[in-house]
Image (spheres, rainbow, N blue to C red):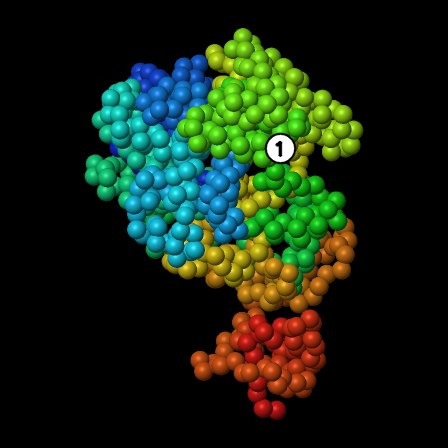
Amino acid sequence: MDYLKSLNPPQHEGVINTDGPCMIIAGAGSGKTRVLTYRIAHLIQTQGIDPFNIMALTFTNKAANEMRERIEKVVGADARNLWMGTFHSVFARMLRAEAHHLGYPNNFTIYDTDDSKSIIKNVVKEMGLDETQYKVNIVYNRISAAKNKLISWQEYLNNPVLMGDDADNMRPEIGNIYKNYSLRCFKSGAMDFDDLLFNTDKLFKEHLEVLNKYQHRIHYVLVDEFQDTNLCQYYIIRKLAAVRQNVCVVGDDAQSIYAFRGADISNILNFEKDYPDLRIIKLEQNYRSTKNIVEAANSVIAKNKAQLPKQVWTANEEGTLIELIKATSDNEEGKLIASSIFEEKMQHQYSFKDFAVLYRTNSQSRSIEEALRRMNIKYKVVGGLSFYQRKEIKDLLAYLRFSLNQQDEASFRRIINLPKRGIGDSTIDKVVVAANDHGIPIWEVLENATSFLGGRASGPIDDFVTKIKRFGIEIQNKDAYEAAAEIAKSSGLLKELYEDKTAEGLSRYENVQELLNAVKEFVDDSDRTDKGLGAFLQEVSLITGQDETKDNDPDKVTLMTIHMAKGLEFKNVYIAGLEEDLFPSQMMLSSRAELEEERRLFYVAITRAQKKLFLSYAITRYRFGRLKQCESSRFLEDIDKRYINVNTKFSGKELSEPHPNYAKKFVSDMKRSASLQPAAKPVYKPPVDFAPSDTRGLKEGMKVEHPKFGFGTVVKMDVEGAERKARINFVDFGEKTLLLSFAKLKIHEN
C-alpha cells in the first residue's frame, strides 16, 4: 500500500473510508483525482472488491482513461473490468443489454446534436410551422432541458406551466414537436444523448427487476465532478446505490459552472439531506498555485452566499502579485497580453505551452489572435470545429450507421443522394410521408419503392437498397476496418473526394483517410474483444469535444473560453475582458443564482494559474458593430487589493504596431512606475446627490463632472455616425474621448 504514503491526512481519510455515503469536497488543485483513483484501487487491492462490482462515473473520456491508467499501475489489468467511463458511455453500455425492455433494438443508433437538430428541423417543416419562429436551436434546447429534468413528452403536454411559457414566447407547438421528435427517434431505433440518461431512469422506474439486478451487481458507486450533475444523473445514481448506500461523490461547489447544460448545483449543496449519515471529507490544501493566487481566489468566492464552507490554503511560495492590465481598447488589450507573454517567456525561460489566455466568449479571441500573430507567437484555439464534426466525416459515418441500422432516419436523409444519384428532396419527402402514413419504417418503403413511389423514382432507390444490403453483409462478416473501408470505397464517397483536386478537396480526402486510420487503430487494439463496426460507432458517438483535441506541435499559447479550461492548469494565465456586461455576462444578471454562477466561473479561471496571473480589461470595446464605453468588472472589486498590482501606465493611450522590444519596455516601465508610485491614485468619488445632465446642449469650453473621472473641461465636440462624442480634459485623469449616449456627465456653470 505504498500509494497511501503520498497522501495528506484528509486525502488518506478519503481513500480508506470506503463504506457508506461519502462526499469529498475537493478545493481547486487539492488532488481529487488522486483520491478518487486510490479509493478505487484500495477497494480492489485491499478490500478484495471485484472490479465488476464498482462503477466510476466521469464527465469526459479523457478523465476516465487517466483514472483507469492510474488504477492499473496499482492493481494491474483488473482495472479494465471496472464500470468506468462517462455517464453517457456507461449507461449506453447498460442500455445495449436492456433496451429491448423499452422497445428499442439493442443495436440502437446514438444521435449526436446535429442529427437531433436535423430531425427537429424536418418535424417543424412537416408540421407546417414557421421555421423562423421555431428555430431549431431553441426547440432542441427546450426538449433537452425537459429530458434533463425527467419530463417526458406526455408530461410536457399535460404541464400547464410549460405549455403556458411556450405560449407566452409565441411557440405553443413545442410540446407537439417534442412528441413527434420522440416518436420519430423511437421508430428509427435511435436515442439522442439525453435519451441515454432519460431512458436509463425510465428503465429503472418501469422495470424494477432490471433495477434490482444492477443494484446487486454494482456494490460501489463513485462520481467525479459531482457539482456538474443534472437531476436525471442524480436520480440514476441514487437508485443504483439505494440498496448498499455505498455512494461516494467528489466535487467542488465553487466550480459549478455548467447550469446552461442542465447542471444543478443543489445536487451537491443538498446532498446531506438525502444521506443523513453522510461522511464529509474536505480537501482544502491546494498543491497547484501560489499563496497570492489561492488567497485572491478565496476572497472572490467568499462573496457567494450559496456554498459549502471550506477554507482552501497552500504551503506553496507566496509568489508575485496578480497583475492588472488596463487597456484603452480591445485591440490594445490584445497587444498588451501578447507583449507580456513575450517578455515573460524571455525573462523566465518559459515555453509557449506554459501560457493560457482565457476569456468569457469565443468572439474575444480575435484581437488576441491578431496580436499574437503580429509578434510571431504560436498559439492554438481550443474549441474550434472538431474532427468528427466535419462534413466529409459525418457523411461517411452516416453511411456506416445506416448500413448497420436501416431504421436510422437522420443517416438516411444524409446519404440517400450522396453522391448524387438523382433522388431529389420531393422523393425523399414522399418516402418519409409514406412511412408515416402507413406506420412502417422507412426501410420498408425503400424495399418496396415501386409500390409506394411508382416506377420512375424506384430505379435509383432500388440500386441504393441493394448497396446497403451488401454493406450489411460486409459488416456481419468482417471487422470494423474492413467493412468501413469497403463502404467508403463502394459508396462512391472516396472517389468523389479524390477527384476534387483543389486544396479543400485534398484536405477532405485526407480527413476520410484519417477516419479509416482511426477504425484501424480500434481494430488493432489487443484489449478490445468486440472489433465490430457497431462497437466502433458507439465509441465515436460518445467522444466529447475535449477528447478530440490533438496537436502535433504542443508548444503553443493556449486560447480558450473559461468553460473549456475547467480541469486544466497552466503556469501563467491571462484572463481577458473583465468588464461589466462581458464578464459577468449581461445574460447572467437577472438573478442572484446567475450572478453567483458567473462568480464561480471567475473563480475557476483564477485557479487555473500556478505561478502568475494577469487580469485585463478595456475601456472601449466593439460589441455588435458598435464601439462601447466599458466599466471594469465588479469581480475585480471582489479581489482583496492586497493581492493585486494595479498599473495604468498605458491607460488612455493607443499603442502603435508592436515591436520585439516593446514587451521589455512595458515590464520595465511597470517596475519603474511601481517604485516611484507605491500607492495607486484613488478613484474619484462623486457626491451622493450626483445627477447626470441633459448633454444635448454640451459645447466646447464647458465644465463637466464625471462619476468616475471627476472634473474636466470639454476640449472638442465631434460626431461619429449617429453618435455625438466629446473630448474632455479631466483634471486628474487627462484627456478622454467619451460617447455622450453612454457618458454620465453633469454640466457645471463656468
Residue nearest the observer in this picture, 242 or 578? 242
* Left or right: 188 in relation to 205: right
Q: Tell me which residue sits at (58%, 16%) in the image.
A: 466
In this rendering, the count of numbered labels is 1
Residue nearest the observer in this picture, 212 or 181? 181
Q: Report the quarter where the N terminus lies.
A: top left
Disc 1 marks which amino acid?
Gly
Would you name the residue on which mark 1 appears? Answer: 424
Q: Horizontal and vertical percent for residue 19? A: 26, 27
Mark 1, secondary structure of its residue: loop
User: Does residue 549 sit above or below 529 in this rendering?
Assistant: below
* Left or right: 58 in relation to 341: left
* Left or right: 658 in relation to 471: right
Kindly indicate the quadrant of the structure image that contains residue 258: top left
Q: Report the quarter where the C terminus lies.
A: bottom right
The residue furthest top is 477
Q: Tell me which residue sits at (67%, 41%) in the image.
A: 379
Q: Horizontal and vertical percent for residue 543? A: 51, 29
User: Does residue 137 sit above or below 631 in this rendering?
Assistant: above
Q: Can residue 634 be seen in this view?
A: yes
Classify mark 1: residues with Cα within 10 Å, few (<14), some (14-19) or many (20+): few
Kindly indicate the quadrant of the structure image that contains residue 411: top right
Q: Can residue 252 be seen in this view?
A: no
The residue furthest bottom is 750
